[in-house]
Amino acid sequence: MAKTPLHRIAHARAGDKGNRGNISLICYALEDYAIIRDQVTPDFVARVFAARASSKITRYELPQLGAMNFVIDGLLEGGVNSSLGLDGHGKALSFLLLAAEVETP
């Protein structure tokens, strides 16, 4: 097994609603879905975003698409319209997730 950044096997899209961030993780190849399903858990995502002190992370699985969607409460430091953070909509936050490493064969 080797450590591989997620961006090698998946891409991401991000959005926002109030203080809630939404990050979708989509595998380039359907056969890699098992890797992200088994390793990219809500706890994994919580560790990636530990500095943001998110209150709740919910994962929605879309196995037929080789994707999953994470809804992360408290991610946007007060919300897109009130945060002083430079990434109010969470776009760069998806890159933070994609930089995290998983074990691959």
Image (cartoon, grey):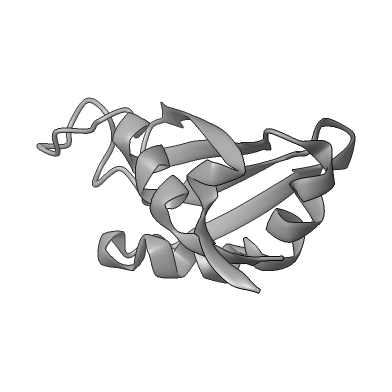
How many circles with numbers are drawn on the protein? 0
**Residue at coordinates 28% horizontally, 59% vertically from top-left?**
52
Q: Based on the displayed image, in which of its 4 quarters is residue 82 positioned?
A: top left
Nearest the eye: 5 or 92:
5
Q: Position of residue 77 (x, y in %)?
A: 24, 47
Q: Residue at x 72, y 65 (%)?
A: 105
* Quadrant in which residue 76 is drawn: top left
Can residue 98 be seen from the camera position used here? yes
Q: Position of residue 19 (x, y in %)?
A: 36, 40
The quadrant holding residue 100 is bottom left
Q: Residue at x 75, y 66 (%)?
A: 38
> Is residue 89 left or right of 60 when viewed as pictured?
left
> Looking at the figure, which quarter contains the N terminus?
bottom right
Seen as rendered, the residue at the extreme left is 84
List x then y, in percent, for residue 45.
50, 61
- Residue, far right: 64
For image coordinates 81% across by 56% down, the residue present is 34
Residue 24 visible in the displayed image:
no
| Nearest to the observer: residue 39 or residue 8 | 8
